[in-house]
Image (spheres, grey):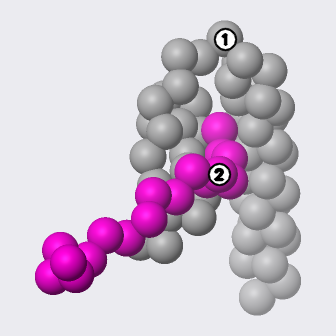
Amino acid sequence: MYIFEIIAKFLRDRKIKQGFLQEIETEENYEDCEHVYLAIDSTKDYLACTKCGHVIKNTYKPEKKNIFKI
């Protein structure tokens, strides 16, 4: 059982280190990207770039128009 714990710990640490390096690369490259932002969820509070993953807060929210109101 101890051997499996060591192997799991090794694999977990290895995955964390690789993911960390990829995040640094995207942070450096987001300034050169031609951003195309889409909403992350249905509230449309935050937008993410489809190319590089850069996340921003949505500052523009159009008013909801009621078509039945005169």
- Image marks 2 and 1: residues in contact by CB distance under 8 Å: no
Placement of 37 over or under 67, stated as above or below:
above
- Residue located 76% across and 88% down the image: 1
Q: Is residue 40 visible?
A: no
- Cα separation, mark 2 vs mark 1, equals 22 Å
10 Å crowding of disc 2: few (<14), some (14-19), many (20+): few
Mark 1 or mark 2, which is nearer the start of the sequence?
A: 1
Find residue 28 and report its image quarter.
top right
**x and y percentages locating residue 67 in the rendered image:** 18, 74
Q: Which of marks 2 and 1 is in front?
A: 2
Q: Position of residue 18 (x, y in %)?
A: 75, 41
- Residue underneath mark 1: 32
63 or 44: nearer the viewer: 63
Label 1: few (<14), some (14–19) or many (≥20) C-alpha neighbours in 10 Å: few
Residue drawn 52% across the image and 58% down it = 61
Residue 40, label in figure: none
The relative height of residue 62 versus residue 27 in the rendered view (above or below) is below
Percent x, y of residue 13: 83, 57
What secondary structure do most residues of the magenta stretch adopt?
loop
Q: Is residue 67 left or right of residue 12?
A: left
Where 13 sits versus 22, above or below? below
Q: Is residue 27 visible?
A: yes
Q: Nearer the viewer, residue 14 or 28?
A: 28
Query: Which residue is pictured at 82% across the width and 68% down the height?
Result: 9
**Residue 36, x across and y down, in percent:** 46, 30
Is 28 situated left or right of 33 in this image? right
Residue for badge 2: 59
In magenta, the rendered stretch is 54-70
| Quadrant for the C terminus in the image | bottom left
Amino acid under disc 1: Asp
